[in-house]
């Protein structure tokens, strides 16, 4: 698990260096690990706007090179706000304790010099399995439930799910398994609930919050109010470093008025944790927005640090 408190200690600075061609400047990025422990595969995000007046086409042609070794790193560009303009360049360096390394952004690279990897992040809408949306990296996989699964419950059709909770799949392998597991379950007579060597889905969500669902807590009623299944989805990015997507939920009733909810979820390679950016609006003041983590049979141990804003189970 990545240490959430240490993220701010990964320091990044950028220099604009004059190149042989003044119309094609080079950029040098200095990354510092301020901790006394190694940082392996931590994501560095370079904002296009920080590089000055550079076009999306130029930005998309950049490759990341270790200035010391000359080796190239895997990278990915993302249009995060979906406006048709690239926003970020991502790469994942390895840094030793208290180490600073410099990386060049270069163009016109021989394709034979670039690294090749068989592992990646991935996400997609799953219409063949009652409108799931599933996402994964090299360590974990997740899914949540769409409108068809909700309508099946409303109609009394077996196989539906009525929940905005998050399901967690446990992986034993680093390669993508989402497409393979759905095909095994839907077409080949197998089941992703059974471990045949790659892992399984053994985390029951039901009507709970699962692993990261949210709700509005009413202290007076001692009751959690939640949205239903997502109604709209959009894939923002999927690639070797990050997959990112948005989910929108239909307005839902609470003691504080009608609520609206949108999630932007991302998962980076090498991380056990998805990042949830949750946007909610209400007709009136809301007492408390809660995040749920389901305890099955109340086993396990809870850990929390309220001052630093995290908890785990």
Image (cartoon, grey):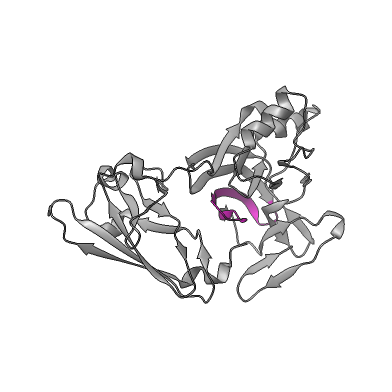
Quarter of the image for the N terminus: give it: bottom right
> Is residue 210 toward the left or the right of residue 72 in the image?
right
Residue 270 located within the stretch drawn in magenta: yes
> Is residue 214 toward the left or the right of residue 62 in the image?
right
Residue 84 in view, yes or no: no
> Is residue 106 toward the left or the right of residue 187 in the image?
left
Q: Main secondary structure of the magenta part?
A: strand
Nearer to the camera, 192 or 285: 192
- Give the quarter of the image for residue 110: top left
Residue 76 located within the stretch drawn in magenta: no
Nearer to the camera, 87 or 239: 239
Residue 104 in view, yes or no: yes
237 in relation to 153, above or below: below
> Is residue 156 toward the left or the right of residue 261 in the image?
right
Question: Residues in magenta?
Answer: 254-277
Residue at 75% of width from left, 42% of height from top? 201
């Amino acid at each position: 698990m990545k240490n959430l408190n240490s993220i701010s200690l990964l320091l990044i600075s950028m220099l604009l260096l004059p190149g042989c061609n003044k119309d094609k400047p080079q950029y040098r990025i200095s990354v510092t690990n301020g901790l006394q422990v190694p940082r392996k595969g931590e994501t560095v995000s370079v904002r296009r706007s920080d590089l000055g007046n550079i076009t999306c086409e130029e930005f998309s042609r950049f490759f990341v090179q270790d200035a010391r070794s000359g080796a190239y790193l895997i990278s990915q560009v993302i249009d995060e706000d979906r406006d048709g303009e690239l926003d970020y360049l991502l790469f994942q360096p390895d840094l030793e304790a208290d180490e600073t390394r410099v990386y060049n952004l270069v163009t016109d690279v021989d394709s034979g010099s670039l690294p090749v990897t068989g592992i990646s992040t991935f996400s997609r809408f799953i219409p063949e399995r009652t409108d799931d949306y599933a996402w994964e990296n090299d360590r974990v996989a997740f899914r949540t439930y769409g409108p068809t699964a909700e309508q099946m419950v409303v109609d009394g059709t077996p196989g539906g799910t009525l929940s905005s909770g998050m399901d967690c799949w446990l992986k034993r392998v680093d390669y993508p398994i989402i497409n393979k597991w759905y095909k095994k379950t839907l077409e080949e007579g197998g089941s992703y609930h059974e471990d045949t060597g790659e892992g399984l889905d053994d985390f029951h969500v039901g009507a709970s919050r699962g692993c990261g669902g949210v709700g509005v807590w009413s202290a007076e009623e001692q009751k959690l109010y939640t949205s239903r299944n997502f109604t709209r989805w959009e894939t923002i990015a999927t690639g070797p470093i990050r997959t990112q997507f948005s989910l929108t939920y239909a307005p839902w009733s609470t003691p504080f008025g009608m609520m609206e909810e949108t999630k932007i979820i991302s998962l980076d390679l090498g991380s056990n944790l998805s990042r949830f950016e949750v946007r909610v609006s209400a007709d009136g003041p809301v007492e408390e927005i809660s995040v749920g983590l389901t305890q099955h049979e109340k086993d396990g141990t809870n850990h929390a640090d309220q001052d630093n804003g995290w908890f785990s189970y």
